[in-house]
Amino acid sequence: MSIELYNFSQSTCSIKVRLLLAEKKLPWIDKCLVSSENQHLSDWYLKLNPNGVVPTLIDGGQSIFESTAILEYLEDKYDKISFRPKDPFLCSQVRAWLVFTDVWPTPAVRVPSFQYGGLREKFKVMSDQTFKALRKKRPLKVEFYESFDKYDGFHLSEVYNSFKVLLRSFKRMELLLEKFSGPWLFGKKYTIGDIAILPTVDRLEDLGFDALWRLAYPRVADWLRNAQERSATKKTFYHGSRLSHQFPNLVRGAGSNDKIVREFLNSID
Ligand SMILES: N[C@@H](CCC(=O)N[C@@H](CS)C(=O)NCC(=O)O)C(=O)O
């Protein structure tokens, strides 16, 4: 039975899984959903993934959700080409990083993605009634959708809080690259630890917030360039999977929001 992946083209959590499938050269069927059509909130999808989010992997008729759990599952089941260290200590370090990534930078990147990346656009054209009804349908993310105004977005303090978390995450990456001597976060081997954070860093570069690491963390800049050069990465970020492809008038790529980053950095000095 073949592998199927329910995903959105632009979703960072979906891209994590697509990256690993490409690195492992596993064939899979692309069950690409369109976020603005809200199929991920329909009854049939909630049976596959009770959290009402993408990605969901179907393998052997079983449904597996949570992107990090999917990475570990693929590592366990399809181990011919492995992206997890064999050494138990190193493996523990990768796992600690996977937890860190899920708890801190992954939720934090949602704020600039919605504020500057066009992800709020679909709500602006919705009636208040539909917006509220869809908010209620969300099994987990009700509070997140209540935390922004569909026209004005997030308060600046929320945006700055997310930048603070992201800045801390890049500092942590710089330290890992130094500690394990690169070129990857845990040394010479490219691992699911790199894959788990790559979509977030790529997203921020696409949104023009790369000054968050460019100014202070040069190892992170080199790491990103190396990761983007991998053929599996190029294949995974097909046209349409970056917000600059979907919202070219809003999202203008590397360096385009240096001014906002400078204002933020001045505010925390
Ligand atoms: N912890 C989950 C998070 C999944 C998640 O938040 N997915 C987003 C796309 S990156 C989503 O489906 N959003 C739909 C929504 O907010 O309605 C995972 O890692 O799989």
Image: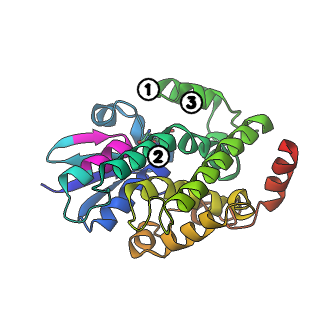
Provide residue 103's location: percent of width, then percent of height: 51, 37
Task: Decide which of tag 1 and tag 3 comes sooner along the chain.
Answer: 3
Within 10 Å of the Cα at label 2, are there few (<14), some (14-19), or many (20+) other Cα atoms? Answer: many
Q: Count numbered badges in the picture.
A: 3
Q: Is residue 11 above or below residue 240?
A: above
Magenta segment: does it hold 65? yes
Please state, as top left, top right, bottom left or bottom right, where the N terminus lies in the image: bottom left
Q: Is residue 153 visible?
A: no
User: What residue is shown with label 2?
Assistant: 97
Of the residues tagged 1 and 3, which is closer to the observer?
A: 1
Marks 3,2: beta carbons within 8 A: no
Q: CA distance from mark 1 to mark 3?
A: 16 Å
Q: Amino acid at mark 2?
A: Trp
Q: Amino acid at mark 3?
A: Thr
Answer above or below: position of 251 versus 101: below
Of the 4 image quadrants, the one containing the C terminus is top right
Q: Is residue 95 left or right of residue 156?
A: left
Mark whose residue sits in front, 1 or 2: 2
Q: Which residues are magenta?
A: 63-73
SS label for mark 2? helix
Residue 21: x and y in percent read 31, 61
Cβ of mark 1 under 8 A from ligand 1:
no
> Is 93 contained in the magenta span?
no
**Residue 174 appears at what percent x and percent y?**
60, 58
Q: Of the numbered discs in the image, which one, if any, rests on residue 139?
A: 1
User: What colour scheme governs how the chains and residues are painted in the rendered image of this protein?
Assistant: rainbow
- Report whether the residue tagged 2 is closer than 8 Å to ligand 1: no
Q: Earlier in the sequence, mark 3 or mark 2?
A: 2
Does 85 sit left or right of 176 as displayed? Answer: left
Residue 173: which quarter of the image? bottom right
